[in-house]
Image (cartoon, coloured by chain):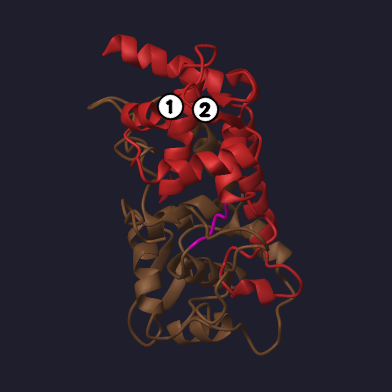
Chain colours: A brown, B red
Amino acid sequence: MELTLGSRVDYAVRAVVDLARHHGGGRRKAREVSDAMAIPASYLPQVLAPLVRAGVVVSESGPAGGYELRHPPGEITLLQVIRAVEGDPSSTTCVLRGGPCLAGGPCAMHEPWMQAQEAFLAKLAAITFADLVADSVATVPGGLPPADVVVATPSDGVGPSDVAVSAGARRMPPDER
Amino acid sequence: MELTLGKRADYTVRAVLDLACHFGDGRRKADEIAAEMEIPRSYLPQLLAELVRSGLVVSVAGRHGGYALARPPHEVSLLEVIEAVEGPIASTECVLRGGPCRWEDACAFHEPWARAQAALRDSLAQTSFAEVASIDAVLAADS
């Protein structure tokens, strides 16, 4: 079982890391962010828009415009950014699809799974972008590879991931694997 | 964002829940499990075979055969069952696909993500099928 994030969150985290690094140094141009973090320039607006909507990032248009963090990096958590892009974890949807869940009520797995999910999310909420920036001061010169070049592969002997951190209410269709 | 179990893990958890609910009552037929837990009849054998291979379930062939948990439900954790079909919850792979992980050796994201993953694992390891079965009994009584 492997937990992975999609490329949209990947790029969003990168963009916020860039803005966190330059926080207090004035607004960053979209071009600067995408160059520094190897985010496709055409994709960046889609990545930043949900962050602006969520109040994580402020955008100003015009010649002196650009992007910056609304709050100091120490006040922005990983969970906030993931949620801004992927939406809130649903607490009402049943884990076990359509199965033992009684109509209108939670299934037996609901509570245990929610607890596990909460434990997971609490850790993500405990990490701020100040932490991430401190841990990543040394970047490879020349920037990063595009996120879509290398796809995470399951470790040896492990089948395809069956646990997904997915956007919104999207679920894997039953026959996808 | 949503954490979901895939179809395979979902059905497997259901099958083990069924066996946990009937633990001590003799063996369960595949047909009974499939009907009770709404698991496609054709899909069930491969899931049960996986559980048998990992030692969580014992199967006996023949007229009086069937499936039973190899251990009491309180000794079977959610984590064991999920990992039996999904493989270990990996924390060595890069989360952000190909991206920031090329920053030096590990990306800044790696450690926090690994910690979050460990928390998820711990929580699943602490939950036994005896608990899940008792929740199930309460829910069934309420309905």
Other-residue count near label 1 (Cα within 10 Å), few / some / many at <14 / 14–19 / ≥20:
some
Circle 1 sits on which residue?
B29
Task: Give residue B45's position: percent from left, percent from top.
Answer: 46, 42
Residue B143 in magenta stretch: no
Q: Is residue B39 left or right of residue B121?
A: left
Marks 1/2 in contact by CB < 8 Å: the verdict is: yes
- Label whose residue precedes the other's in the sequence (1 or 2): 1
Count of marks placed on residues: 2
Q: Secondary structure at mark 1?
A: loop
User: In terms of secondary structure, where does tag 2 sit?
Assistant: strand
A62 shown above or below A92: below
Give the residue at x 46% y 83%: A29
Q: Quadrant of residue A108?
A: top left
**For residue A123, above or below residue A64:** above
Q: What type is the residue that disc 1 sits on? A: Lys
Q: Which residues are magenta?
A: A1-5
Task: Residue at 66%, 90% (x, y): give it.
Answer: A142
Q: Is residue B5 left or right of residue A139?
A: left
Residue A51 location (% of width, % of height)? 40, 63
Of B90 and A34, nearer the camera is B90
At 65% from the left edge and 40% from the top edge, which residue is drawn?
Answer: B54
- Percent x, y for residue A55? 38, 57
Q: Where is residue A104 drawn, in percent x and y?
A: 23, 27
User: Which residue reaches farthest top?
Assistant: B141
Seen in the picture, residue A116 relative to A8 is either above or below; the reply is above
- Horizontal side of A97 relative to A10 (left or right) equals left
- Occupied quadrant, residue B72: top right
Rounded to the nearest angstrom, the CA distance separating label 1 from label 2 is 6 Å
Q: Which residue is mark 2?
A: B67
